Amino acid sequence: MEELFREAEPEENPLPKSPGAEAPLAARLRPASFEEMLGQDALLGAGGPVLQAARQDRLPSVILVGPPGSGKTTLARLLAASQHAHLVSLSAVSAGVADIRKLVEEARQRRRAGQRTILFLDEIHHFSRTQQDALLPHVESGLLTLIGATTENPSFQLTGALLSRVLVWELAPLGEDELRALLERALADPRGLGGRELSLESGAAEMLVRGSGGDARTMLNALEQAAAGLEPGAAVDAQRVTQALASPHLLHDRAGDLHFQVLSAFIKSLRGSDPDAALYWLARLLEGGEDPLVPARRMVILAAEDVGLADPQALTMAVAAHRAAQVVGMPECRLPLGEAAVYLALAPKSNSVYRGYSAAAEDVGAHLQLPVPLHLRNPVTRRDRELGYGRGYQYAHDDPEGLVGHTHLPEQLVGRRYYHPSGRGREAELKEVLARIAARRSESRPATPQRPEEPTPR
């Protein structure tokens, strides 16, 4: 693959010098070529977009999206190394519009000298709309080739104008096979621990792989800590790895895209009647540091939206779990929240109330300010009675079954049905109730006179 890259002058080479022995293990093992990168076959495989971009005289602007430790920074550096260009690295966390202006002026000077500028902008999702707008014209004109890196969904975090001018490449978390291969490389490579002839017990290796959450940097940091102080030729055992992973890495950003992905998986597991998955995703949220009231609120909503009247007790259970989370907090509230999650997952499902309300709201929007039917208006004054207020109103308690024959909708909407019970759970009984009500209304019996002792109809 070496023929893909032209020789660059030393001052143009964007790759930094190899880190010294004092650098962290993850930094020392950073791949120096595309061949050394593990995983990302869709991007780095034969015919993949990375190699095609590296062959071009002018690298396109790209956004690299992926979880921590998936290789975004490494890939950005290797892409920059494939070009005769000057690399500038900035972090969007600390950089501002003034930094962009300074960078643009320097890029103009380099362009007059025949040199292009590549901007690697880490954590680009932290750039505000104003900062992105300041960057946009220089990316559009080609003065700057942008390589952005983010852990967040760019569709939510970046402006449409900027997104339309870049390619978006998504990096996946490293799989367990790639992580095992990286462990072997770390033990054998002279840049890593190769000079110490250390070995890694199989149980310890699996702990490192599974405790990393797909983050290569986290895994290598834990390996380095576990191997610290060992004599050459020694074995890294499970006990040392356990100590190194005393604070296991659980990827969960309460303000980030993954936060909403995990919440979405939790809700869909409840809706899909999968209690095991519901408990797993709930544990991912809580053990990752999520505010327990967040999943509690979602369960209250789901109880009304997705269970509804198929099991009216579901809403009571969800509200009680929410209240319990407020009263006892973590870690004890995990149990009432888990109880509610299992209950909701196994409850019969119906979204008939949700659909009914949505249909009613649609009619409200389409027929603004429809008058209240006269028979439903309270005849408070003599003028009200002269105008017919309350005339024909039937008092439900005067009927043996508590049913009335008249409608309660505005005249223009008579016959509309918003609530259609699902027939599951409690709603099977409600279907029968609705059938009796419909039969009574179809009789169109004469209105029952209002009782004198009830001057204000209900």
Image (cartoon, grey):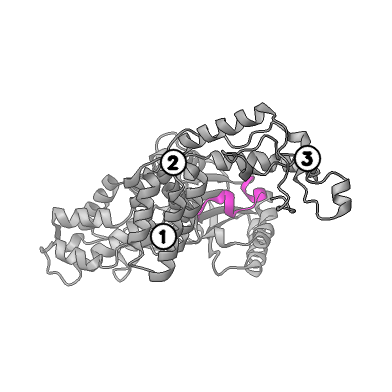
Question: Magenta region: which residues?
Answer: 150-164
Q: Which mark is residue 367?
A: 3
Kindly indicate the quadrant of the structure image that contains residue 164: top right
Tell me the SS state at disc 2. Answer: helix
Q: Residue at x 57, y 43 (%)?
A: 354
Lateral position of residue 138 relative to residue 280, left or right: right
Q: Position of residue 103 (x, y in %)?
A: 63, 64
Q: Which residue is mark 1?
A: 321
Marked residue nearer the N-terminal end (3 or 1): 1
Q: Residue at x 56, y 62 (%)?
A: 126
What amino acid type should be assigned to the residue bearing mark 2? Leu
- Whether residue 344 can be seen here: yes
Tell me the SS state at disc 3. Answer: loop
Give the position of the N terminus as an image quadrant.
top left
Q: Nearer the viewer, mark 1 or mark 2?
A: 1
Q: Residue at x 66, y 67 (%)?
A: 97
How far apart are the alpha carbons under marks 1 and 2?
A: 45 Å
Q: For the residue carrying disc 2, how many other residues have a C-alpha within 10 Å: few (<14), some (14-19), or many (20+)?
A: some
Q: Which mark is residue 43?
A: 2
As drawn, 180 above or below 102 = above
